[in-house]
Image (spheres, grey):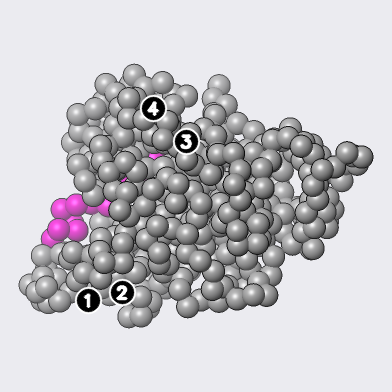
Amino acid sequence: MKQQIVNAKIVNEGSIIEGDLLIDGDRIAGINKFSTDIEHTIDADGGYLIPGMIDDQVHFREPGFEHKAEIATESRAAVAGGITSYMEMPNCNPLTISEEKLLDKRSRAAKKSLANYAFYLGATNDNLENIKGVNPALTCGIKIFMGASTGNMLVDNQQTLEGIFSSTNLLVATHCEDTPTILAAEQGAQKKWGEEIPFSEHPNIRSTEACYKSSSLAVSLAKKYGTKLHVLHLTTEKELALFEKGPLEKKQITSEACVHHLFFSEEDYELKGALIKCNPAIKKRSDRDSLRKAVIDDLIDVIATDHAPHTMEEKSEKYLKAPAGLPLVQHALVSLFEQIREGLFTVEKIVQKTSHAPATLFQVADRGFIREGYFADLTIIKPNNAGSHVQILSKCGWSPFTGHNFSHQVTHTWVNGNLAFENNSILDVPKGRALSFDRT
């Protein structure tokens, strides 16, 4: 089917062009390219037309934790938020630590995911041979929980770390926090408050020191072995010294910021409490502001979500029992557009960090850009005239952004040329596809 999107501000590769976009089947057929046999037309009415976000870090909880979330529900929320592709983490049950489990997840997603998908192979202290032998076409990269983890995925054996960093040609993505440092701080907090630890203590327990000790180790190992390293969800100003400015294509070691760490600060714990408890923790305003500047300066390369839902019942527990993690995919892009409105970022910069950069970093084939011949993974974002009180599509049913009236809204999302979301409605369209990688 041939479709056209007209009257759009097309944002791509550092520029904004006003015009029309032609879609032929599942691919982009051209910008301002004339055709006589159009079957469907969408008027963008001056809205921004951008390549769909490629979210390189989500937890969709399937298999094993379907009471929190499922691939079907969370991919619906993602599409409603303008995310057309995602890369999902391995700490489910059973853990995704073998090729067999990767294939199981891919099979599940093929049946029910509305967005395109890829899955990380998780590292443990004893699955080095699985990492060495995995078919690289089946995974976006190797995920290591360095120093801190939920579940049985803590990799704290130095010999194992050396083995992983020295033996894989795949991208290694790391969660960097140091467990002994965290446990010591937690014990100190328990002595002071008992079971009534305030949530405002979370950034002191999951501290700057805990983050830096682990991330500096990851960077040193990558430099030692020439590993392609991507450090996930930076939260501190101190860690930024480990990375270099410049174009992504020239970097061996890259970093990511997440939308909630760019939006919230420790001042929000008083109101939000457990609803913004996440690992690593949301920290000081000065850390948040430094992360924002690092995005602008191309010190931070990618913006993602780390979408990690829990039930409201679970989040209603006291500090020590309330799990860490937030549902974020549905509001990721619109939260970034708030910072555009405030003059912090440009639309071009946000598209670079949410679409172009993850496609380039992970060598995703034919996605992440508005280019002729690329898959038509697209979204329209427009000023919000109807308020932000829309249905929460994540299975958990809540959002840390509740109460915030966003200035922009996602009105349309296409996945592989199929209109999957239109004006607050999920459409019955073919499912997403497995991402493929152009690795040479």
Report the mark closest to the observer, 4 or 1. 4
Q: Secondary structure at mark 4?
A: helix
In this view, the residue in front, 124 or 147, is 124
Q: Is residue 234 magenta?
A: no
Q: Mark number for residue 111? A: 3
Report the mark closest to the observer, 2 or 3. 3
Q: Looking at the image, is mark 1 or mark 2 earlier in the sequence? A: 1
Quadrant occupied by the N terminus: top right
- The structure residue drawn at horizontal position 68% and vertical position 75%, both measured from the top left corner, is 385
Residue 52 drawn at (x, y percent)? 62, 48
Q: Is residue 175 magenta?
A: yes
Question: Disc 2 designates what residue?
Answer: 273
| Residue type highlighted by circle 4 | Leu
Q: Looking at the image, is mark 3 or mark 1 earlier in the sequence? A: 3
In this view, the residue in front, 179 or 91, is 91
Residue 365 drawn at (x, y percent)? 60, 31
Residue 435 drawn at (x, y percent)? 53, 33
Q: Could you tell me how far apart the alpha carbons at marks 3 and 1 are, in whole angstroms?
A: 42 Å
- The structure residue drawn at horizontal position 10% and vertical position 65%, both measured from the top left corner, is 187
